[in-house]
Image (cartoon, rainbow, N blue to C red):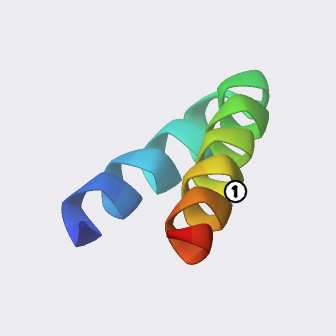
Amino acid sequence: MSHAFYLNKFAVEMDPTTGERTQELIDAITSFVARH
């Protein structure tokens, strides 16, 4: 799990647009996991 977050953090720093999409994806996964 932590590896994915490091990868996402790197992508966020490299590309703001990718960062937004990544954050949306993280939020979606987080809420999905929280519901199940």
At which x and y percent is residue 9? 50, 55
Identify the residue at image location x=58%, y=65%: 30
Q: Where 20 sits versus 26, above or below?
A: above
Q: Quadrant of residue 31?
A: bottom right
Observer-nearest of 36 and 7: 36
- Specify the quadrant of the image occupied by residue 18: top right
Residue 14 appears at what percent x and percent y? Answer: 57, 33
Q: Is residue 21 above or below residue 12?
A: above
Look at mark 1 in the image and give the residue it sits on: 27
- Within 10 Å of disc 1 (Cα), the crowding (few <14, some 14-19, many 20+) is few
Q: What's the amino acid at mark 1?
A: Asp
Nearer-the-camera pick, 9 or 33: 33
Above-or-below relation of 5 to 12: below
> Considering depth in this image, is 15 or 28 the residue closer to the camera?
28
Q: Residue at x 70, y 56 (%)?
A: 27
Among the 4 quarters of the image, the one containing residue 1: bottom left
Give left or right: position of 5 versus 22.
left
